Amino acid sequence: MVLSLDDIKKEVDMDKDRGDKEKKFKNESMLKYEFIKALEQEFSESLCNKYIRANWLIPALDETIRTGRPDIRISNLVIEVEPPAANLEVGREQLMQYMRELYEEAGKRVKVYGLVTNGSIAELWEYDKNDPKQIRSGSMPDVVRDAIERFCSQEKIPVINAEDLIRLVGV
């Protein structure tokens, strides 16, 4: 059974009061795995065009962008998953680097969205014209749904590099 974003937040919040052996998410990898499944579920229920949902929303995991490896990248959306309930500061710094590098890789022609989360809270950022701006912060499920809505409401989903084109056409 796939956990929803709301279920993940609830479990991460409950893990704060649990002993190590009882925790649902013992580490970042476990959280990232469940987050990706929940993200795919949210996209499948989103307002994204049916073709986009079927052919484009294949997350690139740990793919190198120039000098770094964001946890997840879907076109111009970069996601950093931090350890459960951890401070977002380190992830935010990494996210800024990845957003800047993706913006440059895209020829400075598309907005790049960035999301950092620890499973409980999240921040949504926009990088355009070499200027990062925080759009929203708060409860992880709400911020992630906002990110999906913004991503899906783009006039066109940008193809940033050759790997994106391969994912899109399946070559």
Image: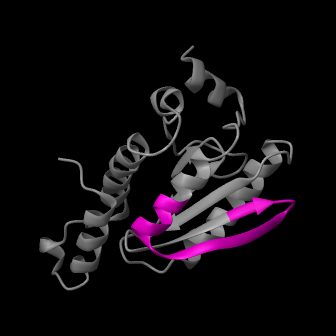
Q: Position of residue 67 (x, y in %)?
A: 71, 50
Count of marks overlaid on the render: 0
In the image, residue 129 lies in the stretch drawn in magenta: yes
Outermost residue to the bottom: 17
| Horizontal relation, residue 24 to residue 80: left or right | left
Outermost residue to the left: 22
In magenta, the rendered stretch is: 126-146
| Horizontal relation, residue 64 to residue 144: left or right | right
Whether residue 129 is situated above or below residue 65 in the rendered picture:
below
State the residue in front, 170 or 29.
Answer: 170
The residue positioned 62% from the left and 60% from the top of the image is 114
Q: Position of residue 103 (x, y in %)?
A: 78, 50
Whether residue 58 is situated above or below residue 24 in the rendered picture:
above
Q: Position of residue 27 (x, y in %)?
A: 32, 65
Whether residue 31 is situated above or below residue 69 in the rendered picture:
below
- Quadrant of the drawing holding the C terminus: top right
In the image, residue 40 lies in the stretch drawn in magenta: no
The residue positioned 18% from the left and 71% from the top of the image is 23
| Horizontal relation, residue 48 to residue 24: left or right | right
State the residue in front, 121 or 94.
Answer: 121
The residue positioned 70% from the left and 40% from the top of the image is 155
